[in-house]
Image: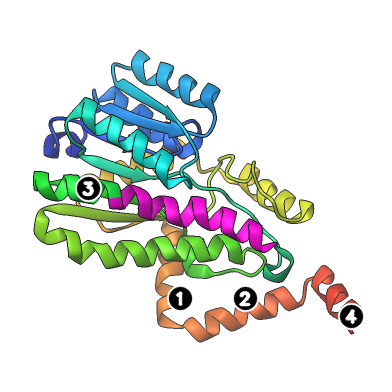
Amino acid sequence: MSLKLSDKFPAKRAFITGAGSGLGRALSIILAADGWTIGITDISTPNVMESKAQIESLGGKALEYTFDVSKKDAYKQAFADYISKTGGIDVLINNAGVGDGGLFDEYSLENWEWIVGINEMAVIYGSYLAAPVMKKQGFGHIISIASVAGIANMPNMSMYNVTKASVIAFSESIYPELKPFGVNVSVVMPTFFRTNIMQHGRGPEDAVAVGNAILKKTPILPSDVAAKILSEAGNGTFHIFHPFQAKLIWYVKRLIPVLFMKRNASSFMKKPWVLKKVAEAK
């Protein structure tokens, strides 16, 4: 299919983190079918090579990079190589991320640093590297994948909520800074969709299991979310929600934040395992 983004950016150059599977691969596949040159990154060499094969089979071009996006020096090296080979960048998609769960004070500080590095700092690294190039060009689009979790702030997943809330705040902050230079910004806030985001979870086994169970039950596929993102980004939409429930949560939280928070607390306090922990603490 022909994308509005392709009309806006005829050079068709994108850089997508976490493109070795899930949403990142789904985004790459749609762009590849429209002839884009895509810098794809992943921490897994087999995964990134599989994505490369799929991209090229559809008529796209893939420049593959295997590194940890939380390592800024490795990110700088890969991005510099991409720019040297493409001459610029039209779309950056900050997609790489990990999910996790558990009580905040039972989640080690080392794990906090790990998830912040991937979900939050990598978004900053990518945007920091892309922004000067895009400003000099006078065009470009930065798309960052957050989550409705960054709005709802449900208990037992603070480590994930915090990082996704930061992506929303960061995107809202840089939007007016980049707009005068012709650079657009979008932030994506989906609900749960079928992906392997919990595969590297470091939280308690039961918390990770609950997350995986939710992901397996959802009928929403990465391809559904990817299509929505690229369509809305082509229209210049800043807040991108999928499905409709995500937008509903956004409005409810903004209109009645205290009630929303109290409902979260009330629901959490009724869980048997929470009551057990409270009793043990006494």
Amino acid type, mark 2: Asn
Residue that mark 4 sits on = 279
Magenta span covers which residues?
Answer: 108-128
Quick check: marks 3 and 4 in contact, CB under 8 Å? no
Give the label, 4 or 2, closer to the camera.
4
- Name the element at disc 2: helix
Sequence-first tag of 3 and 4: 3
Q: Position of residue 85 (x, y in %)?
A: 23, 25
Q: Are marks 1 and 3 in contact (CB under 8 Å)?
A: no
Instruction: Left or right? Give the position of 19 relative to 7.
Output: right
In the picture as drawn, the residue positioned furthest to the front comes out as: 73
Residue at the top extreme, as displayed: 57
Residue at image mark 2? 264
Viewer-proximal residue among 151 and 126 = 126
Residue for point 46% across, 38% down: 18
Q: Position of residue 256 (x, y in %)?
A: 46, 83
Q: Residues under labels 1 and 4: Cα distance? A: 31 Å
Q: Is residue 176 left or right of residue 169?
A: left
Please indicate whether residue 208 sits to the left or right of residue 277 in the image: left
How far apart are the two marked residues, 4 and 2, measured between alpha carbons? 20 Å
Amino acid type, callout 1: Lys
Residue position for label 3: 141
Q: Is residue 206 above or below residue 269?
A: above
Q: Which residue is mark 1?
A: 253
Q: Earlier in the sequence, mark 4 or mark 2?
A: 2
